[in-house]
Image (tube, helix red, strand yellow):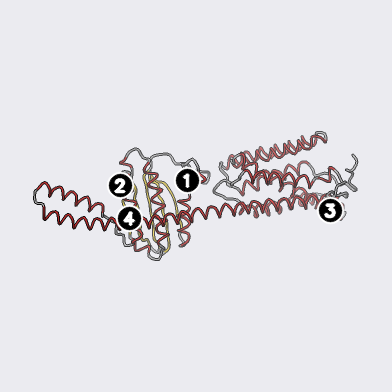
Amino acid sequence: MDGTTITNALPDIPRLYTALCEWLACMVYILAIYRRVSRQRTAAVSAVGLAGMIAIQYLDGAMPLWFWVIGMLLAFGGMWAIVRFAAGTGNREGLYIAARAFVLAELVASLHWQLVTFLQYGLGLPPREPFATLVLIGTYAIAFAAAWLAERGNFAHDAPTSTTWQLSVGTLAITITTFAMSNLSFISTNTPFSGTVGQEVFYIRTLVDFCGFAILYAQQEQARRMAANAELASINAQLASQHQEYLASKENIESIGRLAHDLKHQIAALRAEVDPEHAAAGFEQLEASVAAASAQQHSGNPVLDVILTSKMRTCADRGITLTAVADGKLLDGMSSMDIASLFGNALDNAIEATSKLPDKQQRLIRLALYGQGQFTVIRVENYYDSALKKDSTGALRTTKRDASRHGFGVKSIRHIAAQYGGEVTIRTEDHWFILTALIPR
């Protein structure tokens, strides 16, 4: 075909090498992203996937030239299937990861073959064994290990990769452009972006593939940073909301206290004026109700007192029994906003979960704040009677439908504990959901 002749054309990359490269690229990303299936399933799908990729490549090699594009689409589809079923991703996430793996596979395959042809044709070294195999193993090991080290910090290990339609479309566009530009010389040498000499063609291909990989890496890094900033902004907004709730509760409690104090004086005055026994009994009931309304917690920390008093009233309205044993003095040194957010979020989660129980006798919440050695321990427990869902790592999953918009309460608690050098654990035991925060004094 005119315009497609390459001077000193080099042999094509063996189909087996291409298949192995595509499979290893999938493995790099399966190890880097959040996996939602068992290791046994990952291993089984990966083994079947390797055989499938080899079969696709040899099928493509046995077909005429016009089948080339279809063959590449089949290879991409095979990579998508490996990622989709070996890691348990969604369709869109799998498509996004497969596109990134495809560019990585093209880069490593081109780089390896460029090194091989340079050693053979540039330096005149014969393709002897085991030298050729060592070059293959060394190049693949270094390239894919470097890719894994670079990408493992670019993806969350405890949550699916967030992929919007805009991100997915952009990634596919970059992948298609990279593949087309890197293989342009094999279609036509008569363009400003084509090479005409064998070694030059592979140099252009490797360089273009590397640029494509770098662009996709930067794109994912930017998306990850944007997601982290959005999550942090949401946590900060929730912290501010909890603090405002604390201030409002404090004001309400103080006003109720003043009202109760005034009512007591009024009752005393009325008691002196009214003497009948039935009126006295009524006033006693009124006094008891006022005393209940003015009851407040006294833990030793005024901020915690406000939070506990407010949440106990909420629990009383919902038929929940909240038991709190707290040494508020242990919270000295912690900001009022952090105290309000930490305890507010923990109790809000417990109240929301416990309110759903049909049996009011099971609506139980226990809070404990105590010292243990050099640590301050905060435990919030609530009863549950339903099955809790867990992911492949054993972490509890939210039971709410829109999981992407929930879970910030626990993240906020972890964030506050981490600020003071502490950590948070969540576990279940005999129908009790237990959140424990351990904070150094």
Real-space Cα separation, disc 3 to disc 1, in angstroms:
53 Å
Displayed quadrant of residue 93 = top right
Please report contact status of discs 2 and 3: CB closer than 8 Å, yes or no. Answer: no
Q: Which residue is mark 2?
A: 316
Judge the density around disc 2: few (<14), some (14-19), many (≥20) Cα neighbours within 10 Å.
few
Q: Earlier in the sequence, mark 1 or mark 2?
A: 2
Residue type for callout 2: Ala
Real-space Cα separation, disc 1 to disc 4, in angstroms:
36 Å
Q: Which residue is mark 3?
A: 118
Of badges 4 and 3, the one in the foreground is 4
- Residue for point 73% across, 36% down: 56
Please report contact status of discs 3 and 1: CB closer than 8 Å, yes or no. Answer: no
Real-space Cα separation, disc 2 to disc 4, in angstroms:
17 Å
Residue type for callout 4: Asn
Displayed quadrant of residue 12 = top right
Judge the density around disc 4: few (<14), some (14-19), many (≥20) Cα neighbours within 10 Å.
some
Q: Earlier in the sequence, mark 2 or mark 4?
A: 4
Quarter of the N terminus within the rendering: top right
Q: Earlier in the sequence, mark 4 or mark 3?
A: 3
Q: Nearer the viewer, residue 412 or 259?
A: 259
Please report contact status of discs 4 and 3: CB closer than 8 Å, yes or no. Answer: no
Res 224 visible: yes
Res 43 visible: no
Q: Which residue is mark 4?
A: 252
Real-space Cα separation, disc 4 to disc 3, in angstroms:
80 Å
Task: Using the image, tell me which numbered label, if any, was put on residue 396.
Answer: 1
